[in-house]
Image (cartoon, rainbow, N blue to C red):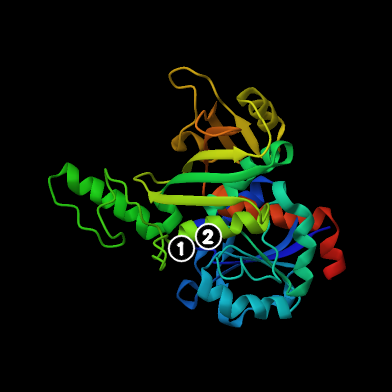
Amino acid sequence: MKVNVALVGATGNVGQEMLTILAERLFPVENIYAIASRASLGREISFGDKTLKCVDLETFDFSKVDIALFAAGGSVAKDYAPKAAAAGAIVIDNSSHYRMDPDVPLIVPEVNADAVSGFKKKNIIANPNCSTAQLVVVLKPLHEIAKIKRVVVSTYQSTSGAGKAAMDELFDQTKDIYVNDGPTPKFFTKQIAFNVIPHIDVFMEDGFTKEEWKMMVETKKILDTKIKLVATCARVPTFVGHAEAVNIEFENPISDDQAREILREAPGLMVFDKREDGGYITPVECVGEFATFVSRIRVDPTVDNGLSLWCVSDNLRKGAALNAVQIAETLLNRGLLEKAA
């Protein structure tokens, strides 16, 4: 089956990555429409060996497409995703707007693909937060074997997770420091070059940031409502690739060797774990890759049935664009597009 696709937010980092991944994975596209704001009307965007011209979101007829991939932020999703869904398109939204809506499935295909059929309530599927997506892919196979009770996670998130302006600020500040100019924060609250900022998204009343809250509630919705999770999310001076230090407490015994073998067999994961210098994967090494990489798997002796590990993933891919395309592939492979049509 050939599929007609609309991509809303085609000029952004995630939108362009979606186009790249659709082409790389040979998604069976019949027609594809690059959709952006009126300011980008006519701008040319690459899709494989083709060139697309951006069309205006305000006037686009979504009845022409089977799937609408949204990569344009919460306000756009709020206003236009229901219009696309009402026109018959299945919306896959990358923003946070619909993630906790009980009538919208929140999907990571390696973890809860069976929940995808829940899109029928609103014709909308939500893509999880970038840091949540890579985490639950790691947690799922371990949870099936030993049942997770509690997770403590610290994230080290790249600037691309905050968009092009954030990446530009890291570049500009780094350049300024090398020429002895003082780095001036504009996008971030503090200097990002050669620094770490323990603050992503807005602060909530309980002292957590919204990014940390997202990881807590999204993991429960995707994986298991009984799992307790606490997160500390930090922005680090890298361009692409999120890293996470994860501590897991299980109900049942599990060894580090068991965990290593389980994760090696799990979909979407690559284990690279050598107890030697360089025997782990860093964010710069995962850029452009589909997999989430797991390293530093070891027993946590401070709790019963505890493990600690390190995982990294390309946040523009598994954390956003790749996961959205995988959701579209799941719909296609399960024959849900024919039924929707």
199 to the left or right of 75: left
Say if mark 1 contacts mark 2, CB within 8 Å.
yes
The residue carrying mark 2 is: 214
> Which secondary structure lies at badge 1?
helix
- Quadrant placement of the N terminus: bottom right
Please name the residue shown 39% across and 50% down the image.
234
Please tell me how crowded label 1 is: few (under 14), some (14-19), or many (20+) other residues with Cα within 10 Å. some
Would you place residue 277 above or below residue 170 in this image? above
Relative horizontal placement of residue 90, taking residue 192 as reference (left or right): right
Locate the C terminus by quadrant. Answer: bottom right
Tag count in the figure? 2
In the rendered image, which residue does mark 1 sit on? 210
- Please indicate whether residue 233 sits to the left or right of residue 140 in the image: left
| Secondary structure at numbered mark 2 | helix
Q: Is residue 239 above or below residue 64?
A: above
Q: Residue at x 86, y 65 (%)?
A: 338
Q: Position of residue 194 (x, y in %)?
A: 26, 43
Gap between marks 1 and 2, in whole Å? 6 Å
Disc number placed over residue 107 in the picture, else none: none
- Measuring from the top left, give residue 239's x and y in whole percent: 40, 46
Q: Residue 327: horizontal and vertical position, in percent?
A: 71, 56
Three-letter code, disc 1: Lys
Say few, some or many: other residues with alpha carbon within 10 Å of mark 2 (under 14 / 14 to 19 / 20 or more). Answer: many
Q: Nearer the viewer, residue 275 or 182?
A: 275
Residue 189 versus residue 42 in the image, above or below: above
Of 190 and 219, nearer the camera is: 219
How far across and down, in percent of the image, does residue 267 sit?
70, 38
From this viewpoint, is residue 49 visible?
no
Under mark 2, the amino acid is Lys
Residue occupying the point 64% across, 23% down: 257
| Residue 334 seen in render | yes
